[in-house]
Image (cartoon, helix red, strand yellow):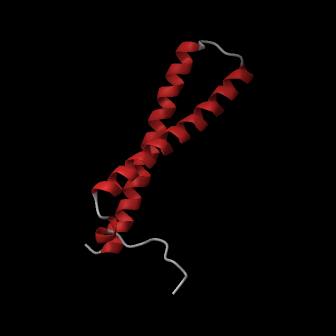
Amino acid sequence: MNKKVNTALFILGATLINMVLIFLFILLFVIIVGMLFPEPSPGAAQLMFLLIFVLSLASSFLIYHKSMKWIARKVDMDKYFHPIFRSRRK
């Protein structure tokens, strides 16, 4: 496979993993909030779901960011992947 195919597959796989992480964090936070607040009022429930969504996005981004830094330290990205953004200076 060439660098462009590797890049496309990597982006596709990383996006899929990030979506799965978001889903798992939403599930985890819903379970935790459900245990802490068994029957919240409708207004509080809406606020909790909004907070759960934001927390799950932030948590998945944090894990994604840390794992990408770790992978970048272990693997020479320039060797396997095509650059997505190029410098405009020539």
Q: Considering depth in this image, is 46 or 73 the residue closer to the camera?
A: 73
Q: Considering depth in this image, is 16 or 77 the residue closer to the camera?
A: 77
Q: What is the residue that sits farthest to the bottom in this orientation?
A: 90
Q: Considering depth in this image, is 61 or 41 the residue closer to the camera?
A: 61
Name the side, left or right, on which 24 lies relative to 30: left
Q: Is residue 44 above or below residue 86?
A: above
Q: Is residue 47 above or below residue 23?
A: above
Q: Residue at x 35, y 63 (%)?
A: 9
Q: Residue at x 63, y 30 (%)?
A: 49
Task: Give the image location of residue 45, x and y in percent.
Answer: 67, 23
Count how many numbered circles sit on residues in the image. Answer: 0
Task: Give the image location of residue 83, x and y in percent.
Answer: 42, 72
Q: What is the residue that sits farthest to the right in this orientation?
A: 43
Residue 78 picture quarter: bottom left
Task: Give the image location of residue 73, x and y in percent.
Answer: 32, 55
Task: Give the image location of residue 50, x and y in percent.
Answer: 65, 33
Q: Residue at x 37, y 73 (%)?
A: 82
Q: What is the residue that sits farthest to the left in this orientation?
A: 1
Q: Which part of the image, by quadrant, shows the N terminus?
A: bottom left
Q: Is residue 2 above or below residue 67?
A: below
